């Protein structure tokens, strides 16, 4: 039996991949889950379940009893909410509570899952960990929440908290149950629901490579340092072409200007506030799409030995899983 490890967010996409990777390594995995959490992603796994919430100090301390390492992957991952500041509060306070509990219980090492959302993209280049957003430049509540939570962990690490930070780019692959915003793009494109595109780009990485990067950060990462866990930089147009090729559809060729889409986004948000359903298009998403969100994992490759498979393989795994799960018609 290996080390006792706690993973928060194991019902989610990245968290379940991290928990599975630890289990395959032989570790004794405990997962923190709310009583209401959907447990599809941990079915068939021999995880110990600790019921609790990252916003509850008592349950966090109980969950860390006897634990050597903690992977704090849980986050409120919404790109829109009726009250955007709720996302910021949840991710900042949740991270503070988890880190305080880890310090109080004497956890030996923590891997904190941040995001490239806290990094500032630049036109025409793949940025690294030094390209940092500020609260004034970051776009949207989710990105702000990851920024302020990351800064908190950095400050606590300088004060002695044994935390390493990892920043996944855009994970895709199997077990994207919710699915994530990028997963929704894959499903929509595969189902013929994306006849056009805007000119943007992102960095795609297989979720299981991200999980492997978390384990490498535990073993080799330097305390207080941040490591981008990314794959390949891809234009949205090219990503859609790969998806459509896998399902036998014609790839979209029409490029849309952003300007006319803003009124549609405002309408979608207005309807969402009335219905409570997440809008398919938001103003923040359009603003983010102005940037090609390209990132370099050179530091993780050099210091951790991190590697990532080609993005086309990650898309293929995602499409296969979505098809088997019934998301793709």
Image: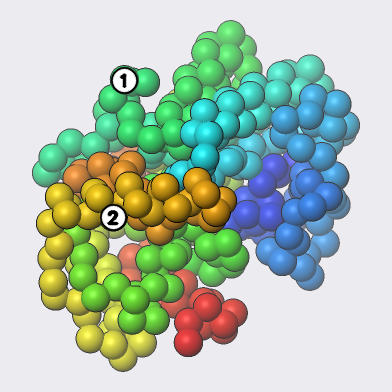
- Separation (CA) of disc 2 from disc 1: 26 Å
Q: Left of 299 or right of it: where is 55?
A: right
Looking at the rendered structure, the secondary structure element under dot 2 is: helix
State which mark lies toward you, 2 or 1: 2
Q: For residue 47, what is the image quadrant?
A: bottom right
The residue shown at (58%, 61%) is 178
- Which of disc 1 and disc 2 is earlier in sequence? 1
Q: Nearer the viewer, residue 200 or 44?
A: 200
Residue 222 percent across, percent down from the top left: 50, 27
- 228 to 146, vertically: above or below: below
Looking at the rendered structure, the secondary structure element under dot 1 is: loop
Residue 264's disc is: 2
The residue shown at (70%, 44%) is 7
Q: Nearer the viewer, residue 2 or 140?
A: 140
Residue 210 percent across, percent down from the top left: 49, 52
Say few, some or many: other residues with alpha carbon within 10 Å of mark 1 (under 14 / 14 to 19 / 20 or more): few
Task: State whether residue 211 appears in this view.
Answer: no
Q: Left of 236 or right of it: where is 59?
A: right
Q: Which residue is mark 1?
A: 136
Residue at the top extreme, as displayed: 159
The residue shown at (84%, 32%) is 59
- 247 to 316, vertically: above or below: below
């Amino acid at each position: 039996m290996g080390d006792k490890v706690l993973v928060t967010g194991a019902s989610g996409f990245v968290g379940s991949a991290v928990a599975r990777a630890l289990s395959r390594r032989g570790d004794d995995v405990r997962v923190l889950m709310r009583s209401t959490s959907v447990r599809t992603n941990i079915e068939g796994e021999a995880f110990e379940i600790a019921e609790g919430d990252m916003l509850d100090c008592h349950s966090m301390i109980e969950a860390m009893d006897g634990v050597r390492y903690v992977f704090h992957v849980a986050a409120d991952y919404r790109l829109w909410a009726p009250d955007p500041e709720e996302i910021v509060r949840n991710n900042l306070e949740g991270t503070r509570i988890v880190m305080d509990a880890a310090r109080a219980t004497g956890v030996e090492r923590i891997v904190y899952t941040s995001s490239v959302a806290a990094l500032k993209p630049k036109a025409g280049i793949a940025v690294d960990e030094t390209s940092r957003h500020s609260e004034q430049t970051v776009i949207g509540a989710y990105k702000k929440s990851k920024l302020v939570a990351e800064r908190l962990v950095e400050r606590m690490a300088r004060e002695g908290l044994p935390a390493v930070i990892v920043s996944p780019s855009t994970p895709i692959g199997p077990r994207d149950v919710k699915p994530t915003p990028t997963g929704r793009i894959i499903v929509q494109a595969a189902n013929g629901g994306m006849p056009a595109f805007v000119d943007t780009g992102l960095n795609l990485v297989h979720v299981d490579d991200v999980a492997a990067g978390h384990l490498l950060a535990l073993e080799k990462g330097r305390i207080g340092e941040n490591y981008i866990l990314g794959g390949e930089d891809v234009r949205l147009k090219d990503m859609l072409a790969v998806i459509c090729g896998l399902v036998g559809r014609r790839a979209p060729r029409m490029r849309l200007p952003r300007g006319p889409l803003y009124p549609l986004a405002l309408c979608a948000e207005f309807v969402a506030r009335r219905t409570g359903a997440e809008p398919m298009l938001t103003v923040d998403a359009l603003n983010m799409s102005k940037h090609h969100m390209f990132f370099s994992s050179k530091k993780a490759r050099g210091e951790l030995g991190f590697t990532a498979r080609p993005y086309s393989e990650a898309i293929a795994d995602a499409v296969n899983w979505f098809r088997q799960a019934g998301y793709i018609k």
